[in-house]
């Protein structure tokens, strides 16, 4: 059982319908959950301020950005200064009109200082930047500016990552935008999408064609035990279509053990590996030729111990059914799942009879369900259809060289490190 009945999934609060002309398992549209966002003026997770004790200013004053007296600045504004060749910022201080200091951090390249949370709308701030000059003198610059009023037109966003959750080694950082980010704005937005890993692992962003999603991953699967810290600092970013980003979203999560599933259509077996060791081989039934399963590297996106596949709205009467399903694990937006299929146990390992899903026995489905995590990879090979880009979290279905081509900013060989 299993079929692509719906050509899309409802993406949570975005109300975004993915347009996927595919076939596969049927189920009610998915409501995606996202991390809560920090609206401008919210406290946010504090980041360390720029350290260093400045000396007494003795050099020419610095020109600070935003300029002194400027108004209607975005709440995403960063603090910068025009430095002499060889000059280095030693301290940045941003305060409100009542003297309260705003937390933040200097970018690693020294280009600007980023507040740890969105600034407040229609609020006055004073920025002071101190820098050491090559001749040993110290320069300082000060600017008082006011942020803009809250705009009426905003984009909405989502982040598929939650605090204190444990994910699989193939879990990409997935940021979502509706409407999509125009191509000419993606570099500006990408500069405000921060990912840190512990232990450090380089990575890169990749935008899908219509700009509704961006994935972040490393050249290889994450190392087990990795801590992911993410901030999608979208709030207040002005876009060329007249809209502004709505909120900042942050999450800190952990990568668990390396649990991988590999399915070969040639022998209709699933081989399950944990930390590189083969631990179990399961017979499967994949999609029949009329509705084949997708070959490629997919990721477990959702787990439901029990659900209902309802395909009664399918235009083909032969593909309409309502069926109770146990131990369902979604791997595409189009409707492919790994799930228990007691009705096909007699042909599992020998014949493909599903409508696109990976059918396993009730016992094996229960065994898998207890062990898998959101973000665990499953690779399917040898079927009549290739996995379509964007039909699920398809970040790992591209080689690294192909993946980095989707970045809006240059990516160093081997991947980029954190920008903060």
Image: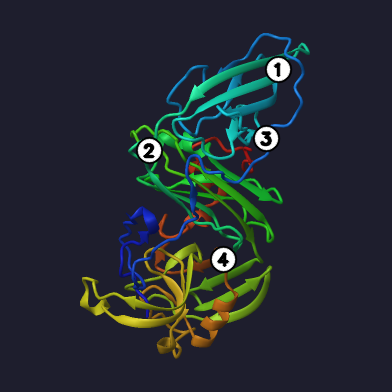
For the residue pair 266 and 259, the one nearer the viewer reads as 259
Q: Secondary structure at mark 4?
A: loop
Q: Residue at x 45, y 36 (%)?
A: 236
Per the image, the residue denoted by label 3 is: 49
Per the image, the residue denoted by label 2 is: 182
**Distance (Cα) linking label 4 and label 2:** 31 Å
Q: Which mark is residue 376?
A: 4
User: In the image, which is nearer the foreground, mark 1 or mark 4?
Assistant: 1
For the residues labelled 4 and 2, say whether their Cβ atoms are less than 8 Å apart: no
The tag earlier along the polypeptide, 3 or 2, is: 3
Q: Residues within 10 Å of mark 2 (few under 14, many from 20)?
A: some
**Distance (Cα) linking label 1 and label 2:** 36 Å
Q: Quadrant of residue 74?
A: top left
**Distance (Cα) linking label 3 and label 2:** 32 Å
Per the image, the residue denoted by label 1 is: 86
The tag earlier along the polypeptide, 1 or 4, is: 1
For the residue pair 60 and 406, the one nearer the viewer reads as 60
For the residues labelled 1 and 2, say whether their Cβ atoms are less than 8 Å apart: no
User: In the image, which is nearer the foreground, mark 3 or mark 1?
Assistant: 3
Q: Is residue 10 left or right of residue 413?
A: left
**Distance (Cα) linking label 3 and label 1:** 22 Å
Q: Secondary structure at mark 2?
A: loop
The tag earlier along the polypeptide, 4 or 2, is: 2
Q: Quadrant of the N terminus?
A: bottom left
Q: Secondary structure at mark 3?
A: loop
């Amino acid at each position: 059982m299993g079929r692509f009945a719906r050509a899309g999934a409802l993406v949570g609060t975005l109300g975004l319908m993915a347009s996927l002309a595919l076939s596969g398992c049927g189920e009610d549209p998915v409501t995606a959950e996202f991390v809560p966002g920090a609206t401008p003026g919210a406290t946010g997770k504090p980041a360390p301020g720029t350290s260093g004790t400045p000396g007494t200013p003795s050099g020419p004053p610095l020109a600070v950005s935003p300029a002194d007296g400027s108004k209607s600045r975005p709440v995403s504004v960063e603090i910068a200064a025009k430095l002499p060749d060889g000059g280095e910022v030693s301290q940045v201080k941003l305060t409100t009109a009542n003297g309260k200091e705003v937390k933040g951090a200097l970018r690693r390249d020294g280009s600007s200082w980023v507040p740890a949370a969105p600034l407040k709308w229609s609020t006055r701030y004073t920025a002071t930047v101190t820098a050491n000059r090559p001749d040993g003198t110290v320069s300082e610059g000060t600017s008082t500016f006011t942020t803009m009023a809250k705009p009426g037109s905003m984009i909405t966003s989502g982040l598929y990552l939650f605090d204190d959750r444990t994910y699989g080694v193939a879990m990409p950082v997935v940021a979502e935008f509706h409407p999509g980010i125009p191509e000419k704005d993606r570099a500006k937005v990408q500069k405000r999408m921060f990912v840190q890993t512990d232990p450090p692992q380089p990575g890169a962003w990749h935008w899908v064609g219509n700009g509704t999603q961006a994935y972040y991953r490393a050249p290889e699967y994450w190392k087990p035990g990795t801590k992911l810290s993410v901030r999608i600092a979208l709030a207040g970013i002005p876009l060329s279509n007249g809209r502004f980003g709505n909120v900042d979203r942050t999450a800190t999560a952990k990568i668990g053990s390396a649990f991988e599933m590999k399915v070969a259509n040639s022998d209709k077996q699933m081989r399950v590996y944990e930390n590189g060791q083969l631990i179990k081989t399961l017979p499967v039934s994949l999609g029949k030729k009329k509705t084949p399963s997708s070959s490629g590297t997919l990721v477990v996106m959702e787990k439901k111990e029990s659900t209902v596949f309802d395909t009664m709205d399918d235009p083909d009467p032969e593909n309409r059914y309502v069926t109770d399903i146990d131990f369902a694990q979604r791997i595409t937006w189009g409707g492919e799942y790994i799930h228990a299929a007691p009705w096909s146990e007699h042909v599992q390992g020998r014949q493909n009879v599903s409508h696109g899903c990976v059918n396993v026995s009730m016992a094996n489905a229960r065994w898998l369900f207890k062990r898998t995590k959101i973000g665990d990879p499953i690779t399917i090979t040898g079927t009549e259809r290739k996995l379509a880009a964007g039909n699920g979290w398809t970040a790992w279905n591209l080689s690294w060289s192909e993946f980095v081509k989707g970045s809006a900013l240059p990516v160093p060989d081997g991947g980029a490190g954190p920008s903060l």
